[in-house]
Image: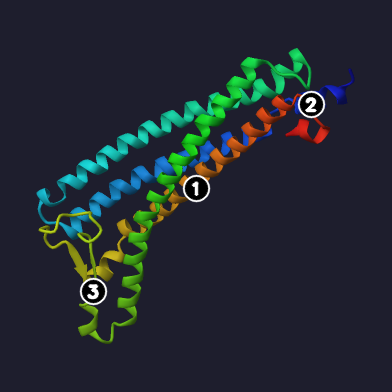
Amino acid sequence: MGCYDCCMRCLGGVPYTSLVATLLCFSGIALFCGCGHQALTETERLIETYFARNLQDYITLAYLIQYFQYIIYGLASFFFLYCIVLLAEGFYTTSATRQTFGEFRSTMCGRCLSSMFIVVTYVLAVLWLLVFAFSALPVYFCYNMDATCHTITVLTETPASINQLCIDARQYGLLPWNAMPGKACGMTLSTVCKTREFRMTYDLYIAAFAGAGITLLALVTALNGGEYICGTCVKNRRLSPIQRSL
């Protein structure tokens, strides 16, 4: 076997779909977990400083934030291990099986393993779709707050109308209805929007939302790659050169 044939054989055994899905999953989870964890911390500071004067008003929110941070730790660990296993399964189905049983054969174990990963990845994709939608809620809240501050800046010549523009954290379920003050209005709200904490929190939530989207894309990519490999094994036919590279 020549050098060129050897290189092409090695490249043909690389599961490019699984590799791309793994890299996307790693980057997406790192972005979602890292930015989401810090964004939750900054949110607690904002609520404590500008929307609640008593600890009892936001103590439930503080506990929820702590629980979400623990969930983030678990998600990071789980997806790190799952992506490694998924990549190893991709190498098994494209490299080891071909070298042992030929390029157009498969084992019952390999078909069952691929089918199991397809089902698990599909369930994870459906669940992560809910996480993706949920991560858009804090972005929506920060966007409304930033848009209200922009309106206040435009209407600085009419102070009477400025005081009617408010952001009430109680309406979004962040605080109980008896929390004081619970909302920020007028120039006070504009000042809050100009603080470093708010800008950082807004950017972190956007980054976490983007990370959730990247992770969802990685799961869909892994799902498509697994269906392709499993479908090729069931059909039991010879792969074309272009399909080998995939």
Q: Is residue 240 above or below residue 141?
A: above
Left or right for 132, reference 176: right
Query: Residue type at mark 1?
Result: Gly
Residues under labels 3 and 1: Cα distance? Answer: 35 Å
Q: Is mark 1 on a helix, strand or loop?
A: helix
* Label whose residue precedes the other's in the sequence (2 or 3): 3
Out of 189 and 239, give the one closest to the viewer: 239
In this view, the residue in front, 92 or 165, is: 92
**In this figure, which colouring scheme has been used for the structure?**
rainbow
| Label 3 sits on residue | 187
Q: Where is residue 169 in the image (x, y as percent from the top left)?
A: 22, 60
Query: What residue is pinned by disc 2?
Result: 237
Kindly report which numbered mark, 3 or 1, lies closer to the viewer in this rendering: 1
Looking at the image, residue 154 sits to the left or right of residue 4; the answer is left
Looking at the image, which residue sits at the far front? 235
Residue plotted at (18% across, 53% down) = 48
Q: Name the residue under label 1.
A: 213
Q: Which residue type does callout 2 highlight?
A: Arg
Image coordinates for residue 163, horizontal then vertical, percent: 20, 77
Q: Which of 122 and 99 is in front in this view?
A: 122
Say whether disc 3 or disc 1 marks the residue closer to the N-terminus. 3
Q: Is residue 84 left or right of residue 229?
A: left
Label 2 crowd (10 A; few <14 / some 14-19 / many >=20): few
Q: Position of residue 235 (x, y in %)?
A: 74, 27
| Residue at 52% over, 36% down | 122
Q: In the rendered image of this protein, does residue 125 appear above or below residue 115? A: below
Q: Do the residues labelled 3 and 1 touch (CB within 8 Å)?
A: no
Dot 2 and dot 3 residues touching (CB under 8 Å) = no
Q: What's the CA distance linking mark 2 and mark 3? A: 70 Å
